[in-house]
Image (spheres, coloured by chain):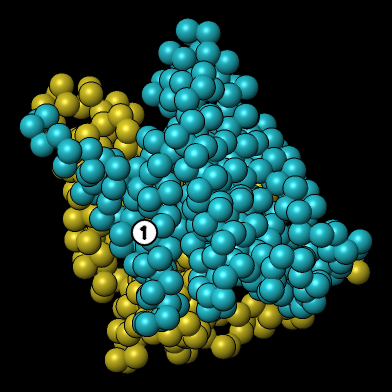
Chain colours: A cyan, B yellow
Amino acid sequence: MKFWIGAVVFLAIALGISLSPVNEYFFFAAYVVLTAVVLATAWNILGGYAGYVNFGPPAFIGVGAYTAVVLFKAIGAPLAVQIVAGAAMGGLLGLGVGLLTLRLRGIFFAIATVAVVFIMETLAINWRYVGGATGLQLQRPEVMVPFTSYTRMLFATMAILAVVSVAVARYVQDSWIGRGLRALRDSEEAAEANGVPTLKLKLFACVISGALLAAGGAPMPMYLSFIEPASTFNLAYTISSLGGSIIGGMSHWGGPIVGALILSTLQQVITVTISGEVNVLIVGVLLVLFVVLAPEGVLGLFKRWLKPSSK
Amino acid sequence: MFSLDLLFEALIFGILLGGFYAAVSMGLSVSFGLLDVPNVAHPAVMVLGSYITYLVATLGLDPILSGIVLMPVFFFVGVLLYRFYYETFERRGTEAGVRGLAFFFGIAFIIEIGLVLAFGADQRSVAAEYIGTSLELGDYRIPYRMLMAFTVAIVLTVGLALYLSKTFTGRAIKAVAQDEPALRLMGANPVRIKQWAFGIATAVSVVAGAMLIVVGPVEPSMDRVYIGRTFCVVVLAGLGSMTGTLVAGLILGIAESIVLMFFGASWAPAVAFGLLLLVLGVRPQGLFGR
C-alpha cells in the first residue's frame, strides 16, 4: 500500500511540474534520467534476479524505437500506441532471444545478446523505409491538451513508464516468480530438480525485461525528432542499464532506481559541464569501482552502514 | 552479378582475411577458451595495442616490429589484470558471473573512451613499404598488407600451438584448463600458471593490434565489431583449440568476404554475429570442442 501511495504522489508531482512554468531544459534532462530508471529496472529483472547478463539493451531499445517510427510514419499512430506496440515487439524479441539461448548461460548468453544488437543494427541500416544508415527526420505532431510542449508530455509519459516498470519489477520480485528466478540464478540444476519451471521462468523474464526495455526506447524518436541506427543501437545503453542496476544494487527493485538516478544525474551534469565522452567514461569507471569495491551496490553499502556491528 | 571469377577473388581475399581473424582471436582463445575468463575486453585491449603500436611506429619503427617490441609490456599488464581479476572475483566464488562480466565490459569501455579522449575519434593509420602496394598475379591483385598479416597470423598460430603442446609451461596451461583441482592436488599452483597464460594471451593481443593497424586504419570504437569476430572464431573453433581457431578464422573470413562481394559492405559486420548466434544455438561446443 505504501508503495502505491508513493507512486501516486510521484506521478502527481511529475504531472504538476510538467504543467508548471519550469524551464524547458529541466524536462529535456529529466526525461533522460527517467528513461535510465526504466532501463535499469527492466535490465535487473533478467540480470539481477535471474543472473543472466543481457548485453543487448540497445537491441530492445532499438526495436521499440523503430516500431514507434514505423507506426508513426505509416499511420501517424499516437505516442501511447507507439509505446504499447514497441513494448509488444520488445517482448517478442525477448521471447526469440530466450528461445534461441535456452541452453546458454553466463558469458555465452551475454555474447549472444551482443550479437543480437549488431544484427538488429544491420537490419535497420539496410531498411530503406526507416531511412537506412542516414536515418530519418521526424515531424512531431501537435501536443495533447493539458501540456504546453511535446517535451513536457514526453516527460510525463516517461514518469508513468517508470512507475509501471518499477511496479512490475516489484511484483516479480515479491511473487513466486522472483523466488523461482533467484533459485535458478543460484543453481539452475538444483532449482529444476526441486520442481521450479526454470525454462518457463527464464523465458518469462526475457519477455518482461525485453518489453520494458523496448517501452523505454519507444518514445526516443519523438524525443529526438530523429532516428538513426548507429546511435540507437549504441552499446553505451548497455553500460548505462547494466551500470545503473549494478551500482544501485541488484537484489532489490529499489537498487536500479537509486543507481540510475545517481548515474544519469551525474551524466547530465558532466555532459553539460565537461563533455559527452567523459560522461560515458564515468559510468565505466564507476561500474568497475563498484563491482570491485562494493559488489552489493549502494543498497549494500547502505545496509552495512545501518548495521555496522553485523561483521 | 554472380561470376566464378568474382567468387575466386572473394575466396582468396577470404582466406587472407580469415588468417588475420584467426590471429586476432588467438589471445581470446587462450584467455577465454582455456582459462574460462569472460574476457570481453579482449578486442579493446587489442585496439589499445594498435594505438600504442601507432605511437611507436611514428618514431620510425616498422609497425609489426613495434608490436613485437611491445609484447613484454603487454605480458606484464596481462599478468596484473588476471591477478586482479582472480583476487576480486574468482576467489570470492559463486556470484562472480554477473560481476566478472560487468568488470571486463567496464574495462573495455574505459579503454575505448580513454582512446577517444587521448587520440580523438578520427581514424589512425601507419605507413610501411608493404602498405598500399599489391602483388599482381595475372588479373588478381593481392595487397601486400593482407599477405603480411596472413604470414604473421600463421606464424603466431603455429607458434602458440607448438608452445602449448611441446613446452612444459604450455602443457601446464592445458592441464589447468582440463582439471584445475587435480593440478592443485599435484602440488602445482594453478593461479600462477593462469597468470602466466593470461600474460601470454595479452602479449599476443598487441601483435594482433599491430596487424589490425597494418590491415587498415583503426578507430577507438573498433573493438565493438571485433567482439563479434573474435568470439565467433573462438566459439566456432571449440574452446581452447588452436588449430580450431585457425579453421574457424578461415570460415569466418571466407563467409564475410563472400557476403562483402555479393551483398555489399553494409551486411558484412552482421556475418560474424550471425554465425556466432548460429553456432551458439546449434552447436555451442564448436567444431573442435573439448
Q: Residues within 10 Å of mark 1 (few under 14, many from 20)?
A: some
Q: Name the residue located 80 percent from the left edge and 76 percent from the top edge.
A: A139
Percent x, y for residue B237? 53, 43
Q: Name the residue located 52 percent from the left edge and 37 percent from the top edge.
A: A4
Percent x, y for residue B94? 30, 29
Above or below, comparing residue A167 to residue B201 in the picture? above
Q: Name the residue located 49 percent from the left edge and 31 percent from the top edge.
A: A1
Percent x, y for residue B236? 57, 43
SS at circle 1 = helix
- Hey, which quadrant is residue B50 in on the image? bottom left
Judging depth in this view, the residue of A280 and B252 nearest the camera is A280
- Residue A69 at least partly seen: yes
**Residue sticking out furthest to the top:** A194
- Hey, which quadrant is residue A101 in on the image? top right
Q: Chain of mark 1?
A: A
Q: Quadrant of the N terminus of chain B?
A: bottom right
- Residue A114 at least partly seen: no
Q: Amino acid at mark 1?
A: Ile
In this figure, what is the number of numbered marks? 1
Q: Name the residue located 43 percent from the left edge and 85 percent from the top edge.
A: B120
- Hey, which quadrant is residue A132 in on the image? bottom right
Above or below, comparing residue A180 to residue A66 in the picture? above
Decide if residue A241 is on the left or right side of residue B177: right
* Residue occupied by mark 1: A262
Decide if residue A64 is on the left or right side of residue B175: right
Judging depth in this view, the residue of B134 and B27 nearest the camera is B27
Percent x, y for residue B265? 72, 71
